[in-house]
Amino acid sequence: MVMAMPDLIAPLRREAGIFLRYSRSRPRFGLHLAIDAILSIVIVLAAFQFFTFISNRESADSLKISGAIAMSGGQLVSFLHHEKLSAYWVGPETDTKYTLIATTPGEVTITYFPKNADIAQLGSGSLVVQTHRRVSASDTEAYAQDVSGLGSFLLNQGSEGNAIHYNPATPTRVILTFKDKLEAVTIIDPTPQASLTLAMKPGVIRKIA
């Protein structure tokens, strides 16, 4: 004996027919329903676009903070403010872009490179300014001495009371510590003595406000 399958479509057709007859007899009901449907679609689309925007922004921010996206000077400053990161630099330069690496807590690295350069092919020929935040003044001093290595000497930067840690054996790297501040800044420039020149000029190495 073969059992007949229940007709699942008929009830739906019946309900749809009742709904259409009700809508035709009451046009305002149909209008309100159409408006509700349009509003629902608009809300769904807006929510989708919002969450897509948030997801894309988080992805872009992750790339920026790991040095994968080049930024203009204004974009760099704005991003540092947005991420509440403390960093020093030598200021903006003409026809220059910047990358940022801040994946290690307490450390921010800013790299300068020509605006038209390919970020994927950047080598060791760029100016780099690294900001290191320590927990105490003695810790900052110990860090500077340790990185500078044997043969380093100190230079006072005028009335500001900053100390320049410099090793003639590695003339491309200089470390600057600030009086009464828990930060050390490492300046790396491929041109010998250039990093020392930058460190010795008062006000050149400055915090991004």
Image (cartoon, rainbow, N blue to C red):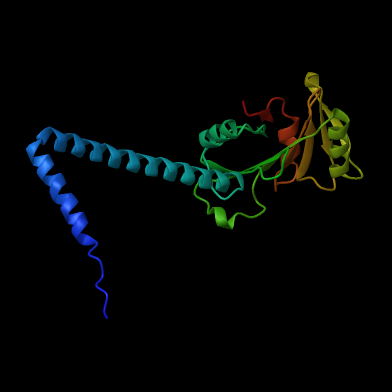
Q: Residue at x 66, y 44 (%)?
A: 127
Of residues 207 and 124, the one nearer the viewer is 207
Picture quadrant of residue 13 = bottom left
Q: Residue at x 85, y 43 (%)?
A: 148
62 to 78, vertically: above or below: below
Picture quadrant of residue 78 = top right
Q: Quadrant of the C terminus?
A: top right
Of residues 199 and 49, the one nearer the viewer is 49
Count the labels in the image: 0
Q: Quadrant of the N terminus?
A: bottom left
Q: Position of residue 4 (x, y in %)?
A: 24, 72
Q: Residue at x 52, y 33 (%)?
A: 74
Of residues 119 and 194, the one nearer the viewer is 119
As drawn, the residue found furthest toward the right would be 150
Would you say 146 lies left or right of 55 here? right
Q: Residue at x 12, y 41 (%)?
A: 22
Picture quadrant of residue 79 = top right
As drawn, the residue found furthest toward the bottom would be 1
As drawn, the residue found furthest toward the left would be 25
Q: Position of residue 205 (x, y in %)?
A: 69, 30
As drawn, the residue found furthest toward the top would be 159
Q: Position of residue 109 (x, y in %)?
A: 67, 42
Would you say 72 lies left or right of 172 here? left
Of residues 138 and 54, the one nearer the viewer is 54
Q: Position of residue 65 (x, y in %)?
A: 60, 44
